[in-house]
Amino acid sequence: MEKKKRKHKERLFLGFVLAALIGMLILSRHLSPLQQKISIPNNQGFTGIETFDHWVTAVSQDDKLHQIDWNRLDQPPRIVPLPSEKAALLQSGEVLALWGKRNINIQGLLPGSDRQRKNDLGLTADNYWIKTGPARNHPVIMTQQYGDPTEYTFYSLNPESLAHRFLFSVQIDSVRDKLKDCQISGRDRLLAVFGRNHGKAWLRLYDLQQEETRWEKHYEDLQTIPFAAFSQDDKTLFIRDGFSRLHQVDAASGDILRSYSIDKKNPNTEETTSIQDIEISPDGTRVAALVHSAICLWDIQTGRLIMRFAPGHKIESGLCFSPDGKFLATADLRQGGPIKIWKLPAQ
């Protein structure tokens, strides 16, 4: 009898330990793995954050670059004033590199308020932007000419000589459709142009080296495409649609390979969730998304949600991986907010 009681107690104890371990595992997916808060004195809030080489680079709303060495996070940031838009256009590619993924609006470089403005490149349009990729080898100019339809034209740009060459143009029905943005891949080989066209979510992939369109797709089940990000090897890209869903797209065919589930409601506020930023890890194995007031991390190969945690405030302005993929950095949109470093679970 005593032997049976002892075995029963052992089973109860083992069951309790197992339940505790499972509970800790579930809870760990929702805890914030905050590694470090880096105070940025007197900043006006951040509009974006990127990794350039070994630097965490955050752009503040008062047009300053706050750069922190990933290898020396305990050191104070160095602050670099952003160049003016004209300087960013007319100076070297190194200056363009400081802007990273940001669009540079070069509208109105010469005096005048006419609808058709002519800039220093000799182009005439209503609006002008420059887009650069991480490698900064193939800056692209995008111009917008209002009309019915509105026409967007794309040119390649040599940042040293300012020589530019026509690539292609797109016409968008300005009443019901919109070109949302464009994105250059990590190797500066591919250009994705996306938004809504002919009443459907639309994505065109252009090969900057071959100077030809690889494919153009309309997605029936998606409302629009407001954001896209490339993997490091240029083989896939991730898009979010108007319903705040995340999709992995094959860069060779344009087919959707996998869709990632995201809660439709924020459990804290009951507001509809919205994906604000997407980043792929340097080794291409994981994708992170800033989803309203949480950061989600998925395994790309399996589609499994690795973890979801709260940054501590819903107003975040972007995220970026460290060069080794072991950490994430986020920047706060609020005035005086810190840069936060998050430790990620091992592969």
Image (cartoon, rainbow, N blue to C red):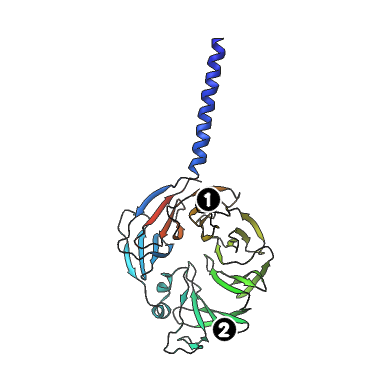
> How many other residues sit within 10 Å of disc 1, few (<14), some (14-19) or many (≥20)?
few
| Cα distance between the residues tagged 2 and 1 | 41 Å
The three-letter amino acid code for the residue at tag 2 is Tyr
Up-down relation of residue 112 to residue 327 (above or below): below
* Residue 55 x, y percent position in the rendering: 39, 61
Q: Residue at x 56, y 48 (%)?
A: 305
Residue 39, relative to residue 100: is it above or below?
above
Q: Which amino acid lies under the numbered mark 1 shown in the image of this protein? A: Pro
Residue matched to label 2: 146
Q: Which mark is residue 267?
A: 1
For this orientation, the residue located farthest to the right is 220
Which of labels 2 and 1 is toward the front?
1
Residue 300, image x and y in percent? 58, 52
Outermost residue toward the front in this view: 270
x then y, percent, for residue 29: 50, 44
Q: Residue at x 30, y 56 (%)?
A: 75
23 vs 209, nearest the viewer:
23
Disc 2, SS: loop
